[in-house]
Amino acid sequence: MKVVILCGGQGTRLREETEFRPKPMVPIGSRPILWHIMKTYSHYGFNDFVLCLGYKGDMIRDYFRNYRWNTCDVTLSLGRSQEVQFHNNHSEENWNVTLANTGEFAMTAFRVKSIQRYIPTGEDFMLTYGDGLSTIDISASIASHQKSGKVCTISAVHPAGRFGALHIEDDSQIRTFSEKPQYEEAYVNGGYMVCKYSMFDYLPADPEMMLERDPMDHLVRDKQLNAYRHEGFWQPMDTYQESQHLNQLWNTGRAPWKVWQ
């Protein structure tokens, strides 16, 4: 089963970083967040990726084209007969990565529609965003999808609290104050979706169509949208503060999403 990752957005809320690179290339530790997402899927045995490129997509192309240069120790001979010697291998040698240009300004539904030719006819595929990390059990989400029989399964997650939570009585008196609770009670779409091939029937060839608008509304209308509830860690990287938080978790050895060895 292939893993489709949306990598083309402009990341305007993270302009401190995305002015210079696409959001999936913003580093967590020494590797881009995209690498962390792909390592999660690879841990569960899924190593065939389709990356939907857009804004500054050439940087993602360059990263994977020069992957050995980026990850291995190397010795260069600078004489007339130039030679390159790589001293070690990397653990991603079984990855297969398709780099697909889906338009610099296209919205998410069109980006997914654009890569339909890379998904074998009738085959399920996985779909996620290139800016969110989680401890989601990929195998369990697939099992939930297959059991439901529906066209699309989204991972329903609790967003991390961004604001102080107040408990207010009828007399307007504040009884409790919790500074940025770890999780909010509501569920949101955390990505890490599983889709039938018929998902493409819900995606118009319209560059201005967002996956999260009409396509999702139509899936709900047709009773074809399933939810896999994930109660554990999930963290998007929408802001500079969130990127700093993820880096702090990684650099202090407390990254819960690191399920690989």
Image (cartoon, helix red, strand yellow):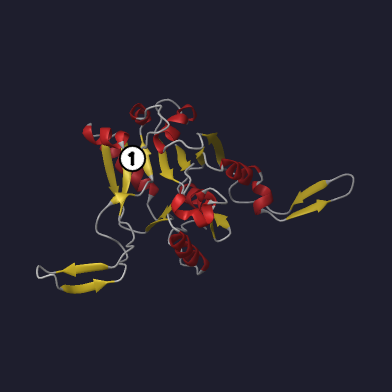
x and y percent of residue 165 in the render?
25, 67
Residue 212 seen in this snapshot: yes
x and y percent of residue 112 in the render?
43, 34
* Side of 212 relative to 176 (left or right): right
At 40% across and 29% down in the image, what residue appears? 206
At 51% across and 37% down in the image, what residue appears? 104
x and y percent of residue 83 in the render?
82, 46
At 89% across and 49% down in the image, what residue appears? 79
Identify residue type, mark 1. Glu
* Side of 73 relative to 40 (left or right): right
Are there few (<14), some (14-19), or many (20+) residues within 10 Å of tag 1?
A: few
* Side of 9 relative to 85 (left or right): left
Give above or below for 71 relative to 195. below
Residue 163 vs residue 191, the one in the foreground: 163
x and y percent of residue 27 in the render?
54, 57
Single out the residue that lies furthest toward the left.
Answer: 170
Residue 176 sits in quarter: bottom left
Residue 119 seen in this snapshot: no
Residue 167 sits in quarter: bottom left
Residue 94 sits in quarter: top right
Residue 124 vs residue 11, the one in the foreground: 11
Tag 1 residue: 212
